[in-house]
Image (spheres, grey):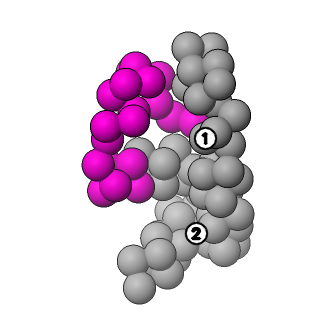
Amino acid sequence: MFYLQSFMQVQKLGKLKDGWHFLTRWHILNRAIPYVKKDWENRKASIGFSNYTLDEFNKISNNDYMLITMSFAA
């Protein structure tokens, strides 16, 4: 239910024409993580973690990870 509410909110705020496109954005972002980790310092901003070291990223809680990635994808 949380995901559906997120999709609807992104569309309502005018961030995307179709809220379901948010799922695609978030999926692409999540799939990019292993590639970004290979060159963390140069690519971390591309996934919304510009203020994190790789060690901090690896220790982040699931809730914080979801909040940051969903915010960045939106």
Residue matched to label 1: 33
Could you classify mark 2 by the number of other residues whose Cα lies within 10 Å: few (under 14), some (14-19), or many (20 or more)? Answer: some
The residue type indicated by label 2 comes to: Gln
Which quadrant is the N terminus positioned in? Answer: bottom left
What numbered label is drawn on residue 70? Answer: none
- Is residue 43 visible to us here? no
Q: Earlier in the sequence, mark 1 or mark 2?
A: 2
Q: To which quarter of the image does residue 37 belong? A: top right
Q: Nearer the viewer, residue 70 or 9?
A: 70
Could you classify mark 1 by the number of other residues whose Cα lies within 10 Å: few (under 14), some (14-19), or many (20 or more)? Answer: some
In the image, what residue occupies the spot 40% across and 20% down?
53
Residue 41 vertical placement versus 62 (above, below): above
What numbered label is drawn on residue 11? Answer: 2
The residue type indicated by label 1 comes to: Ile
In the image, what residue occupies the spot 63% across and 67% down?
23
Residue 57's x, y, as percent? Answer: 39, 33
Q: Please give the range of residues in magenta.
A: 46-66
The residues tagged by marks 1 and 2 sit, at their Cα atoms, a distance apart of 25 Å
Circles 1 and 2 in contact, beta carbons < 8 Å: no
The nearer-to-camera label among 1 and 2 is: 1
